[in-house]
Amino acid sequence: MNKNSSNTMALAPNTSNKRETVCIFGTGDFGRALGHKMIQSGYPVVYGSRSTQISNLIPKDAEVLSHAEAAQKAAIIIIAIQRQHYNFLTPLAEVLRGKVLVDISNNLKLNQYPESNAEYLAQLLPGSKVVKAFNTVSAWALQSGTLDASRQVFVCGDDVEAKQMVMNIVRALGLTPLDKGSLLAAQEIENYPLQLFPMWKFPIFLSLGLTAFFFFYCVVLDIIYTYIYEKNNFSFFIAITIPNRVCPVMALILLALVYLPGIFAAIIQLYRGTKYRRFPDWLDKWMLCRKQLGLIALAFASLHVVFTLVTPLRAFASWRTGKGIISQALNNKTEPLDHTNAWLSDSYLALGILGFFLFVLLGITSLPSVSNNVNWREFRFVQSKLGYLALILCTAHTLVYGGKWFLSPSAYKWYLPNIYILSLIVPCAVLVVKFVLIFPCVDKPLTQIRQGWERNPKYSE
Amino acid sequence: MNKNSSNTMALAPNTSNKRETVCIFGTGDFGRALGHKMIQSGYPVVYGSRSTQISNLIPKDAEVLSHAEAAQKAAIIIIAIQRQHYNFLTPLAEVLRGKVLVDISNNLKLNQYPESNAEYLAQLLPGSKVVKAFNTVSAWALQSGTLDASRQVFVCGDDVEAKQMVMNIVRALGLTPLDKGSLLAAQEIENYPLQLFPMWKFPIFLSLGLTAFFFFYCVVLDIIYTYIYEKNNFSFFIAITIPNRVCPVMALILLALVYLPGIFAAIIQLYRGTKYRRFPDWLDKWMLCRKQLGLIALAFASLHVVFTLVTPLRAFASWRTGKGIISQALNNKTEPLDHTNAWLSDSYLALGILGFFLFVLLGITSLPSVSNNVNWREFRFVQSKLGYLALILCTAHTLVYGGKWFLSPSAYKWYLPNIYILSLIVPCAVLVVKFVLIFPCVDKPLTQIRQGWERNPKYSE
Amino acid sequence: MNKNSSNTMALAPNTSNKRETVCIFGTGDFGRALGHKMIQSGYPVVYGSRSTQISNLIPKDAEVLSHAEAAQKAAIIIIAIQRQHYNFLTPLAEVLRGKVLVDISNNLKLNQYPESNAEYLAQLLPGSKVVKAFNTVSAWALQSGTLDASRQVFVCGDDVEAKQMVMNIVRALGLTPLDKGSLLAAQEIENYPLQLFPMWKFPIFLSLGLTAFFFFYCVVLDIIYTYIYEKNNFSFFIAITIPNRVCPVMALILLALVYLPGIFAAIIQLYRGTKYRRFPDWLDKWMLCRKQLGLIALAFASLHVVFTLVTPLRAFASWRTGKGIISQALNNKTEPLDHTNAWLSDSYLALGILGFFLFVLLGITSLPSVSNNVNWREFRFVQSKLGYLALILCTAHTLVYGGKWFLSPSAYKWYLPNIYILSLIVPCAVLVVKFVLIFPCVDKPLTQIRQGWERNPKYSE
């Protein structure tokens, strides 16, 4: 950076201590909202418009001129026009030469056009410096200025200086600019505000489907069966008892599903003898949503914990406790402590608590701010070592609790297995295969493959 | 950036592999702390001082010279002097020409001077490159180097290269620089360390006031009334029973207060027929502290959950349970299960658990690192859709629990309504009005207004 | 920045709308993984290799040439070679002049060489622009592209423009670049991926040791003593009862250990009469791991809360409750409510809940994203004021609970004090000394010292 240029740049705002004029092309909703906000922040704003008459919608302190006149007054021009009207800018190419054009446009759906709007603008006006910005902010949020999510403004552009100027405006409006690099990033930035939790869709639909299935399974076995064969109406089980049966089952299965793709990947790599071939698509997608699966599992586990802890507060529970005690009292005897039972109940609870504790730890580590402060080795240690430990503890918790039902015929109402038995299939399979994979005779070739070794080099061609 | 300049810049630290000398003007506490830290990090430090004698307070390895001599030795000069003494720098203007001056000063109160100290310094010495930095770090934290909050150093300045040099020093000291743009941001940076949770003040005072009111309301109705009319001393209710009555009430009211300003805003916009006029000041302020209100509501809700869950551990609860069971046993009968009661108790608990679950989800989404990873559409979905769902569930939870008391005359001790009835006023009002606003005949014009349409365009002038 | 250079820079990607060619020296695992990923992201990749024959390991779309030929095709050359082979690059110095060299190497242990690999490379090839990057990313993560922790790529280098080019590539690969300043930061960046929770080691070992000690202490007193003298087998206490005795003790002691070094520091400063001398090493290290100690204390406290809340679900607890009630029923009497007991039980629970609530608040504030949004004054307020309040509440909670045992001889089995008594020593000592330090006659000189005043200026020399 040579002396002269840096001086002119530095002194311009210094000497006047005033914001430079900003020009806005287009008087639509977003153009007006941005103009309002900029005037509030001390920027002189001049609008470029075809008609200079519709002034009463426009902020009072702004000037309205023709496009050419307005553009000449400012070094930065915000293009608040829809993409289909961009070609009307080509006659203005000479006026816009060397100016910073800020593309703020959004599309209606993902990847609507072959190239991003900002790149299209840059192609139309090769003499101008195009910067993509502000598209992730909503007009409503700008005006009310309250929503937190809209604070971040992604900025990209090929000219570093132009990007700096736009980022200074972003900061002056109280927003946080985030440099996303060259104009090639515009496509991604334009797609960003159209997304609605794209990574969460599959995990959420999967867990909704499984939850619905297990819920009706439990309703059939616990309420309908009991009503038909035992004439007991336990319909109120729908509120707490059955959710508290479905939640732990979902948590355990989803947690196992987090570690299952890693098992598949290891088997595929061992079979192929190389890591240099892509996994099948379904496995790739599955591996990409492991974090989401794990967090949903954690949500189910947390619900299970709270549902369990409120048990003593339930009218049903206190009625059952009372009944048991009264029947003892009426029989004039006190039952001695059943030590086996005490051991089982305590160890089942303790295993659950420790498993849940590790599970919460995993959840905290996947908070973006925490995982950013952790290096790859540490992240792997927590997510892999502690994760498997959590899976082992939670599976053991379920085994101790539900174990007694495996062999009892009363657990097979209508020849259907109890929900606990179903919930143990996936986690046990994962743990058994993982145990095999840890054996040195399997682990050694796998480690070699992952370090780049190939069993059969020609295979990869 | 031309070749030569970038090379000189790049090679300077490369060839010597040593830190460049830094000059510090002023030997006060912060100047010395910074000097200590810089010497530790490998920077040669030279102090500029009026007297070169007071050397024993200054770090051993630092040189002490006159201001002019010291300034000549370094490209970066840290001005550790108070603003009122800045004018003594004007005779040195020639020596300081082209140098980077780092303004580290703080004021004693918000907006103490018309312009920021850094801008004032830049006006006094127009030939120097002023950078604002280090003012958010405390001398004590620099010396002990332990407190996390002080890691971030806000940097601003008009000269990009000068800013880079300062940011490199910041990084070398183990701190994290944060570019805040041009020197115009200096005012904000100087105000920053003086704040003490400015956004939290109103929500905290409001909730303290309401808590105190409801607490005494409960003490009067539950303890004093019972003592006078039933001769029962339940003073120990102060520890758990009454807090567990006040907490849910506070949580519900505060959660409703989060959504009330949005309702007001919609009504005002519908009435005015435009969104281009500012809301009244109180509404603007209220909308800006919604996040804080919501988090305080979440804190009360969490306390309510824990207070509820410890119930079975209380001596009072086990005494009451025992009394109930013994009276049944002495009457030689077992009461059958009351199905209505079981339904009510279970559904009340389940509604509460689900409401709290959504509430916690809202809380997690408002963690800065999570909300930064979420776009505006996703944030709105969570905070608006899930937020209203949480409000509905929590209101239903309260209605099912407290519903039986509405018509019971025993709930109106001293003609005062029960606290549950009071807590339902605001949330029910919010939900009813929101329900009306959702009707298409109301929703359609509102959506149009929010997209920029105006019913009466002249109105806005 | 002059016009010409910025234009050539800006237009290059604009006109072609294609990624520039990247050259990779070395065909090892990481070189291939990076090449694969770059080709996927649209970069033409050319490998520089001694032998151009081993092509079947290399991504199909990549060219393989000799080092000199490959280097000429690209402006950016990634050096995927181990440090000990760097000297073979010196003959290529002329070809590499002005090129951007990206050092991606890692070492096997911390501080293996006197200077960082990147600085060594820059010394070997003074005409090239060396940038350190990508070393924190693992080859495995690049290929599978799923692990969150590896998203951040630390970048440092002396040439700003070269750094920008590398950061653009990083962004294009879907990773997040983080500018760490000049090449001096390379040492730190190279050490980063080798760490495994370095700040956590001491706190974790300390708490494991203490936990083991207290666990066996409890086993001896609660199980073995009871078995020998009372012939009762309470071995199932190992699962819940004893952990729930050890956890609160650990939480309280560790929380007190967070505040103890601050007390020591104040005493040392008062004694020395200056803050300008370094603390002893052990105190410095201790102060640096206070956050970790606090978080481990919070983990123990959370476990204590859950262990306590599951109490009513235990078979042992319901057996004990039943026994108590039945004995009353058989004696045909109902015991009246013991008001003292109700007060003690409720206030002990309430103190615990409030203390835990503040504790969780402290934990949330130490999340990186929250503490970054808080200034020094606010952080100090939360961590110091609220932290001491939490310590006071937790100590009071323990005192109210365990107080009755102090004077009871049955608490001294085998002349050993009960674990509660042991747990109170450190927190009470901290609170008492802190109380003394708050007295104006002590606080005033301490504040002066911390503001830079010295009692005995010569002392510091």
Image (tube, coloured by chain):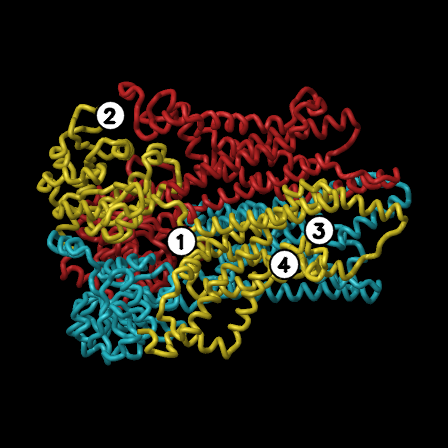
Chain colours: A yellow, B red, C cyan
Residue type beneath disc 3: Leu
User: Is mark 4 in CB contact (under 8 Å) with mark 1?
Assistant: no
Q: Which residue is mark 3?
A: C313
Secondary element at tag 2: loop
User: Is mark 4 in CB contact (under 8 Å) with mark 3?
Assistant: no
User: Which of the two labelled residues, at mark 4 and mark 2, occupies the earlier sequence position?
Assistant: 2
Q: Which mark is residue B151?
A: 1
Q: Which residue is mark 2?
A: A60
C-alpha separation, residue under disc 3 versus residue under disc 2? 68 Å
Tell which of A194 and A166 is nearer to you: A194
Q: Position of residue A351 (x, y in %)?
A: 64, 60
Q: Nearer the viewer, mark 3 or mark 2?
A: 3
Picture residue at 89% right of the left edge, 51% below the top: A333
Letter of the chain that mark 2 sits on in the rendering:
A
Tell which of B262 and C84 is nearer to you: B262
| Residues at marks 3 and 2 on the same chain | no
Within 10 Å of disc 2 (Cα), the crowding (few <14, some 14-19, many 20+) is: few
Q: Which residue is mark 4?
A: A421
Vertical position of residue B333 compared to residue C70: above or below: above
Q: Position of residue A303 (x, y in %)?
A: 58, 48
- Horizontally, residue C256 falls left or right of residue C416, namely left
Q: Which mark is residue A63?
A: none
Secondary element at tag 1: helix
Letter of the chain that mark 4 sits on in the rendering:
A
| Residues at marks 4 and 2 on the same chain | yes
Residue type beneath disc 1: Arg
- Horizontally, residue B411 falls left or right of residue B111, namely right
Image quadrant where residue A31 sits: top left
| Residues at marks 3 and 1 on the same chain | no
Vertical position of residue C291 compared to residue A110: above or below: below
Tell which of C313 and C293 is nearer to you: C313
| Residues at marks 4 and 1 on the same chain | no
